[in-house]
Image: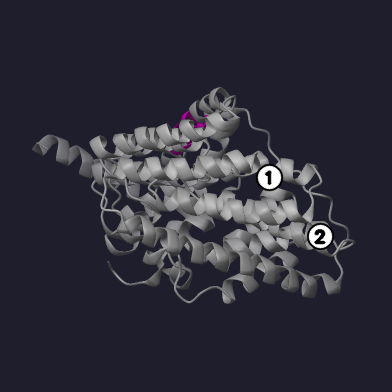
Amino acid sequence: MDFKTRRLAATLRNQINYPLQLNPFVFSRIFLLWVAIGIIGGLIAGAYWTVLESFLHFLKHVEGLYVIPLMTVAGLLAGLIIHFLGDPGEMDLIVNNIRFKGGRLEPKNNLSMILSSLLCIASGGSAGPEAPLVQVTGSTGSWIARKLKFKGEDLRSLSIAGMAAGFTALFGAPLGGSLFALEILHHKHVVEYYQALIPAFVASCSSYVIFILITHIGIGPTWQFPVYATPELNDFFYAVLYALAGTAAGWLFIFTVRQCRYLFRKFGVPVYIKMAVGGLLIGTIAYYVPLSRYFSHDELNILLEKSFTLEFLLVLLVAKILAISFTVTSGWRGGFIIPLFFVGVTAGMIINAAFPGQNLPLILVSCMAAINACVTRTPISTIILLSTLTGFHYFIPIMFASLTGFFLAPKTPLINAQLGVKE
């Protein structure tokens, strides 16, 4: 970079960092940078979602036995993309870079992440677009910060703001998405990233508006949950009991993922072979249990609307946990937060089928909160996310369930970078 370009970047950075002259408010020019990162994140998320919906609409017509070869080939192609364009990494890498490398996220493998994740998600993998979006929008925020010569906490704050923009666009919850972006880094050290809180809020709000304008997704709950009656004192105790089932499902999920990860790591074969094998396994599960296919954004509503036997729900629970585990450990790209919510709802439906006459909305939201807090270690943001996604506006029962899942989670987290040890 020549001298004039460096001087221009330094001048622009200094102008951004200081409040506007004659401005009696807290507002400063850096606010506009946060908004810009959110707008860019919303544009990226909106474009990604539009393309993903087109792919989903095209590939959903492939059903029955044809699902198996489709997903095998999709895994092979996605693996070839990663092999030739570069490995974009997974959530562990993002958390590790934010915590131990000053928040510097590299955008060089974003194309690989976008193309491979679109193939994996659209063909029916049990992983959602949240992780790919967070990596792309977070690295974009990091790239902008470095171009403007930001360093230290300022660089990390803009990277986190980009991550929050990605989370919010998908979940439709600016407050929950912002907190999730901070909390997933490490629940015990959220205060370390306090400087990033306001940038994350601002970027999330602007990203949310842009995403809705592009996708025309309505404002309101994502899933049509049964109406929850006026809460009673006993509901808080019941929420803890129901959360035990969600926590047990979380333990089963973590155990299954670790076993699958161990098995796939033993294969000394290229990534595209692993992903083809993963596609074969996921496709076989989807053939026998079609409701386990995809990342469950729409399938969760099907689960809520229809009636299923206890036997089928038990099979679905095991099938979905296996499908997610094979997806995330064989190299397929995507996140497991929305699929985890599906597992939580399935666990809640099992309780309701085994013990009919209970408070169904409370069962479902308690199991969802517990399993997500157990696996991701995000008890605070889980409360706000679920309230937004389900329309369940009574925070306290969700809080009891979320804390239950969090405190009964395994001591060693699933996301290794949350341990607080530099890898």
Most frequent secondary structure within the magenta stretch? helix
Task: Indicate the quadrant containing the N terminus: top left, top right, bottom left or bottom right.
Answer: top left
Please name the amino acid that badge 2 sits on: Asn
Spot occupied by residue 136 in the image (x, y as percentages of width and height): 38, 41
Q: What's drawn in magenta, residue-wise? A: 41-49
Which of the labelled discs sits on residue 352, or is there none? 2
Q: Tell me whether circle 1 and circle 2 mark residues in contact (CB < 8 Å).
A: no
Q: Earlier in the sequence, mark 1 or mark 2?
A: 1
Foreground pick, 82 / 164: 82
Dot 1 falls on a residue whose secondary structure is helix
Q: Nearer the viewer, residue 138 or 203?
A: 138
Q: Any mark on residue 300, and which?
A: 1
Residue 392 lies in quadrant? bottom right
Q: Dot 2: what SS? A: helix
**Which mark lies nearer to you, 1 or 2?**
2
Residue 299: give x, y in percent of width and height. Answer: 66, 41
Residue 298 visible, this angle: yes
Residue 20 visible from this viewpoint = no
Estimate the x, y position of residue 269 in percent, counting from the top left: 26, 48
Front-most of residues 251 and 154: 251
Q: Is residue 201 above or below residue 45?
A: below
The picture places residue 312, in percent across and down from the top left corner, at 73, 51
Residue displayed at 84% across by 51% down: 227
**Image quadrant containing the C terminus:** bottom left
Residue 165 against residue 114 in the figure, above or below:
below
